[in-house]
Image (cartoon, rainbow, N blue to C red):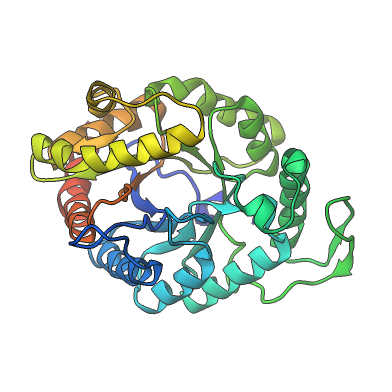
Amino acid sequence: MTDNASTPTAPVGATEILLGLNTFGDAGVDAGGNPKPHAQVLRELLAEAELADAIGLHAFGVGEHHRRDFAVSAPEVFLAAAAARTSQIKLGSAVTVLSSDDPIRVFQRFSTVDAISNGRAEVMLGRGSFVESFPLFGLDLADYEILFEEKLELFDKVRAQKPVHWEGRTRPNVNGMSVFPPLEHHLLPTWIGVGGTPESVLRCAQYGYPIIFAIIGGEPRRFAPLVELYREAMEKYGHPMQQIATHSPGYVAPTDEQAREELFPHWLAQRNRIGAERGWGPASRGEFDAMCGPEGALYVGSPETVARKIVLLKRNLGVDRFDLKYSNGTLPHESMMRCIELFGTVVAPLVAKELADA
C-alpha cells in the first residue's frame, strides 16, 4: 500500500481519538470464591466482545499468555469465534508473542480471521511481558532478542503477499514460496507493541508499522519523547505516518469512589502476585490512588473522570487511539460488562464532544 489515506491505520487527526478494549481473559472466581474454568472465562469473553461491538467501540483485542492467570493462549481462535458474533468492531491480538511463534502461521491465522470477519482483523506483535511461552515451545531465553528480530523480518516479508525469500538462523530458510490465504482488499494491519525503550520504537518505525505503547505505570505524558522519536523516525525512513496508540489498565463505574473501591482489591492481588514473581515490593492503596489521579496510568473512575484523562492523553501525546485494558485479575464478569457499557455509551461521547469543541 502506498496511499496513506486508504490505509486502515492512517492517523485520525487532532479532533478525534479511536477507543478500543483489551483483555487477557483474566481468570476470575465464581460466587463462592473458586477459580472459574478457563472455558467459562472464554465464553464470557465472547459476550464482552459482542457488547463492545453493539455499542460501537472501535476495536477489541485479546492478549496471548500461557499461564493460569489468563485464559487466552490462542488469540486467533477466539477472534474467529468473535468474528461470527460481531459485525463492525476491529478484532486483534494484544499482543501476539511473535518470538515464540512461527511468523508464517501467525499470518495465515490472522488472514483467516480477516476473511471470516470481512476485513476486520489486525495483529499486534510483541515480545510479551511474560516468558512462559519460551520453555513451553522449547525455545532458549538466551535467544530472546534474535528470535524477535528475525521473526519480525520474516513476518514483514510474508505480510507483503509476495513470494518469500528469507534466510536466518532461528528457523529454516524460505526460498521463494507463497503464503496463503492472502487478504482480499489490503495488507494485514500490523502493530508493534512496545514498552518504553527507544530501540523498540526505532524498530517499529523501520518497518513502517503503527505503534502502540503499553503505559501501565508512571505518567503517560513521560512517553512524549518516544512518541516524537517515532514520528521523526518514520519520516527519516520515508514511511507514511501511521497511527500511534496507547494501552493502559482502567475501570469505569458510575462514580469515582465506586470505581476505586470495586477495582482496588482485584488490582492489589494481581499486582502483588506478579510483583512477587518479578522481585517488586508490595503495593499500597496510596500507590493505587496516585495512579488513578489525573496524571496516572490507571484510567479508573466515573465516565467523566475517565473521559477527561483520555482527552488529556490526546492533548499531551497526540495519539490516534486509546485501548482500555478493562479486565483485572478476579474482577467479576458482571462488573466488566458494566464497565464496557459505560466506556462505549458515556465515555466515548464525552471524549468526542470535548475534542470536537476544542
Task: Estimate the x, y position of residue 49 in percent, counting from the top left.
Answer: 32, 65
Q: Residue at x 9, y 35 (%)?
A: 257
- Image quadrant assignment for residue 163: bottom right
Residue 211 at x, y = what percent? 54, 41
Q: Toward the viewer: 353 or 312?
A: 312
Q: From where the camera sits, is residue 357 visible?
A: no
Question: Front-most of 101 and 135?
Answer: 135
Q: Residue at x 44, y 58 (%)?
A: 62
Q: In this view of the protein, can residue 262 be seen by the observer?
A: yes
Left or right placement of residue 283 versus residue 208 in this view:
left
Q: Residue at x 45, y 56 (%)?
A: 68
The image quadrant where one finds the N terminus is bottom right
Total numbered labels: 0
Residue 245 screen position, x and y as percent? 44, 41
In the displayed structure, 346 sits above or below 60; it is above
Residue at image location 37% in from the left, 68% down from the top: 42
Q: Specify the quadrant that holds the C terminus.
A: top left
Residue 305 picture quarter: top left
Percent from the top left, x then y, of residue 216? 40, 33
Say left or right for 131 vs 93.
right
Q: Is residue 95 above or below residue 183?
A: above
- Asked whether, in this view, residue 212 is left or right of residue 186, the answer is left
